[in-house]
Amino acid sequence: MLGDTGPDPAYGGPQPEGRTAARVLVYVDEVDALFDRMVAAGATVLAEPTDQAYGDRSFGITDPQSHCWYFHKRSASDA
């Protein structure tokens, strides 16, 4: 579970230190539309949607709690 920093220090988020403990990679069906929605919702862009050399199309963002998220769409040859 990812979330805001709460009163229990064992379950804190990365925001107070300005860093992240993990990067989450999620495969999705539509990269560009998701990117637009996430930016409109306040995500900070780490990487714009880009076609990768290995065939995926992907982007990266941080959410308001500083969690890093990467979203990929598999290339047609891997689908």
Image: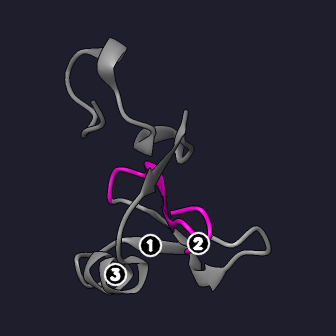
> CA gap, disc 1 to disc 3?
7 Å
Characterize the local packing of mark 3: few (<14), some (14-19) or many (20 or more) Cα atoms within 10 angstroms: some
Q: Kindly identify the amino acid type of the residue bearing the numbered disc 3.
A: Val
Nearer to the camera, 4 or 31: 31
- In the rendered image, which quarter is residue 78 located in? bottom right
Tell which tag, 2 or 3, sits nearer the viewer.
2
Q: Earlier in the sequence, mark 2 or mark 1?
A: 1
Q: Earlier in the sequence, mark 2 or mark 3?
A: 3
Say which residue label 1 marks: 44
Residue 79, horizontal then vertical, whole percent: 50, 63
Seen at 57% across and 44% down, the residue is: 19
Q: On the rendered structure, is 29 left or right of 47? A: left
Q: Which mark is residue 69?
A: none
Q: Earlier in the sequence, mark 1 or mark 3?
A: 3
Q: On the rendered structure, is 75 left or right of 29? A: right
Q: On the rendered structure, is 8 left or right of 25? A: left
Seen at 53% across and 47% down, the residue is: 18
- Secondary-structure class at tag 3: helix
> CA gap, disc 2 to disc 3?
23 Å
Nearer to the camera, 32 or 17: 32
Say which residue label 2 marks: 75
Characterize the local packing of mark 2: few (<14), some (14-19) or many (20 or more) Cα atoms within 10 angstroms: few
- Secondary-structure class at tag 1: strand
- From the viewer's perspective, is residue 65 above or below residue 41? above
- In the rendered image, which quarter is residue 53 located in? bottom right
Q: Which residues are magenta?
A: 64-79
Say which residue label 3 marks: 39
Characterize the local packing of mark 1: few (<14), some (14-19) or many (20 or more) Cα atoms within 10 angstroms: some
- Secondary-structure class at tag 2: loop
